[in-house]
Amino acid sequence: MPRSKSSWPSTEARELNLTLVNRQRDRPLDRAQIRGWVRDVLAEQQQDGELVVQFVSARRSTELNGKFLQHEGPTDIITFDYGSTSQRLCGELFICVAEAIRQAGEFDTTWEEELRRYVLHGLLHLRGFDDLDPAARRTMKREENRLMRRIF
């Protein structure tokens, strides 16, 4: 997995309580690198975080998607907000690595890049961005793309 392009000054380091949980076997994960992605996004946004990021199988993603969103099949990411504020993001991200692999083929990218995008997408949800209607989706996608270029 490529290293993050950002090099934030230590004075901008944010408080981060991050738990990473790997509940999938599709690909090995570099926890230190993922922790760096989250830290870089929070530093860029000048926010603290109390976060859990769970990497799950397609089966678990399908279960969560059906139970909480009433959608069929797996999805790339599901975000639960546990009281985020403008200064501190509090929530849990469930990321499906199998979907990252599938979508990497669809979008001619790498599964690692898809994972970075999913992490960023979930953090944007915790910041209050939404993608339910077309206008909000475009706004969120613009911010996602801007941060992907800036941070990664």
Image (cartoon, grey):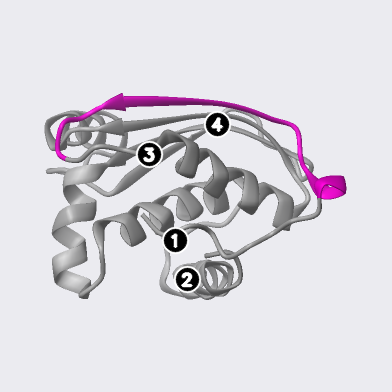
Q: Please state which amino acid type lies under the numbered disc 1.
A: Asp
Q: Which disc is residue 131 wearing?
A: 1
Label located before the other in sequence (2 or 3): 3
Element on which disc 4 rests = strand
Q: Please state which amino acid type lies under the numbered disc 2.
A: Lys
- Measure how far apart labels 2 and 3 are at the Cα level: 26 Å
Label located before the other in sequence (3 or 1): 3
Q: Are marks 2 and 3 in contact (CB under 8 Å)?
A: no
Left or right relative to 8: residue 25 = left
- Measure how far apart labels 4 and 3 are at the Cα level: 21 Å
Q: Are marks 2 and 1 in contact (CB under 8 Å)?
A: yes
- The part of the chain drawn in magenta is 10-26
Label located before the other in sequence (2 or 1): 1
Q: Kindly identify the residue that appears in the image at 18 percent across and 33 percent down.
A: 57
Element on which disc 3 rests = loop
Q: Please state which amino acid type lies under the numbered disc 3.
A: Asp
Q: Which disc is residue 141 wearing?
A: 2
Left or right relative to 92: residue 48 = right
Left or right relative to 142: residue 63 = left
Q: Is residue 103 above or below residue 12?
A: below
**Residue 149: image x %, image y %?**
54, 74
Q: Please name which of the two marks, 2 or 1, marks the residue nearer to the observer.
A: 2
Q: Which disc is residue 30 wearing?
A: 3
Q: Are marks 4 and 3 in contact (CB under 8 Å)?
A: no
Quadrant in the picture for residue 50: top right
**Residue 33: image x %, image y %?**
47, 44
Q: Please name which of the two marks, 2 or 3, marks the residue nearer to the observer.
A: 3
**Residue 17: image x %, image y %?**
64, 25
Residue under pointer 4: 91
Q: Please state which amino acid type lies under the numbered disc 4.
A: Gly
Element on which disc 2 rests = helix
- Crowding at dot 2, Cα within 10 Å, few <14 / some 14-19 / many 20+, comes out as some
